[in-house]
Image (tube, helix red, strand yellow):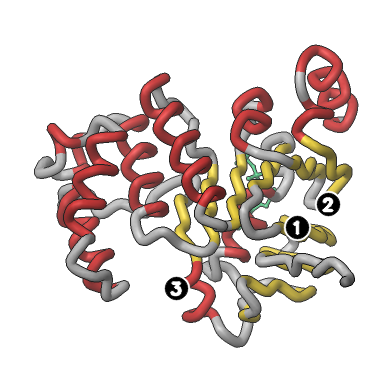
Amino acid sequence: MSEQVPWPVVDVRGLHVRFGEVEAVNGVDLAAYAGHSTALLGRNGAGKSTTMRVIAGVVPPTQGTVSVVGHDVRTEPLEVKRAVGYCPDVGGLVPRATPWEHLQLSARLRRMGPGWEERARDLLERFELGDVAHRVTSGFSHGMGRRLSVVLAAFHEPHVLLLDEPFDGVDPIGVEATLDVVHDARARGACVLVSTHLRELAIEACSSVLVLRGGARVATVTAHDMAGEEGARAYRGLLD
Ligand SMILES: Nc1ncnc2c1ncn2[C@@H]1O[C@H](COP(=O)(O)OP(=O)(O)OP(=O)(O)O)[C@@H](O)[C@H]1O
């Protein structure tokens, strides 16, 4: 019997994104699979966040095709948004709302079943946000906001988990909780993408690594190839 070839849950082909004169993404190809996690690495301005925004259905591609769980981001943005849990690199939180209110709204919009409260409480505890569950987020530190954004992205157990800079300014407890969320998502068969500057955490969270430079992909390697001193040297070599 022939082995089934896995199909990419996230399939990006020849992606270009232009903002006026700026070519933010300049021909990115990416295939990401169920039960796997892929890291996006690259210098500031390499096009990581823009690529993530397109996959999240937030920014339309200028050119190329992007499908998420079989839905085209251009023609089926609502289906894409439903399939995805997205932690943006900045923003996304309502300053006057509490974490609990964010979760309540998400549960309502996504028509989650009665188990949502227990899951919400569990996630808040895991990210040590239980004590501030009813405090408005305007007073949150940067790291607290990042932790809540990861909680919100993972809350509804999406098919595709997109984490943009989830470790930025986050303490070790939050880092551990985020790594657990990635692990759990992979274990239940979700496809995970993580954009970060932290090579060591990228390889801890992910099985493969995509390196972007100037809006284009310069390498796709295994996390193993990026590990240790040799991996650091190899990565440095890909940056300029
Ligand atoms: N809305 C926008 N309008 C104009 N230019 C933009 C916009 N969004 C991104 N860019 C530009 O596109 C390029 C890629 O930006 P992007 O945020 O995708 O990079 P990045 O790899 O995520 O960078 P960083 O690591 O600094 O977050 C940059 O030159 C950036 O200035």
Residue 22 in view here: no
CA–CA distance in space, label 3 to label 2: 28 Å
Q: Is mark 1 within 8 Å of ligand 1?
A: yes
Q: Mark 1: which amino acid? A: Val
Nearer the observer, disc 3 or disc 2? 3
Above/below status of 211 relative to 173: below
Q: Position of residue 126 (x, y in %)?
A: 29, 34
Q: Secondary structure at mark 3?
A: helix
Label 3 is placed on what type of residue? Arg
**Residue topped by disc 3:** 82
Residue in view at x 49 percent, y 31 percent: 167
Check mark 2 vs ligand 1: CB closer than 8 Å? yes or no.
no
Lower position in the chain sequence, tag 1 or tag 2: 1
**Horizontal relation, residue 144 to residue 67: left or right:** left
Measure the C-alpha gap from mark 1 to mark 2: 6 Å
In the foreground, 7 or 76: 7
48 in relation to 159, above or below: above
Judged from the image, the secondary structure of the residue bearing numbered disc 2 is: strand
**Quarter of the figure with the C terminus:** top right
**Residue at image coords 10%, 44%:** 134
Q: Are marks 1 and 2 in contact (CB under 8 Å)?
A: yes
Q: x%, y% of residue 90?
A: 44, 46
Left or right: residue 186 compared with residue 23: left
Neighbours of disc 3 within 10 Å: few (<14), some (14-19), many (20+): some
Q: Which residue is mark 1?
A: 25
Label 1's element?
strand
Residue 75: percent from left, percent from top: 61, 87
* Residue on which the image places disc 2: 216
Whichever of callouts 1 and 3 sits on the residue coming sooner in the sequence is 1
Of badges 1 and 3, the one in the foreground is 3
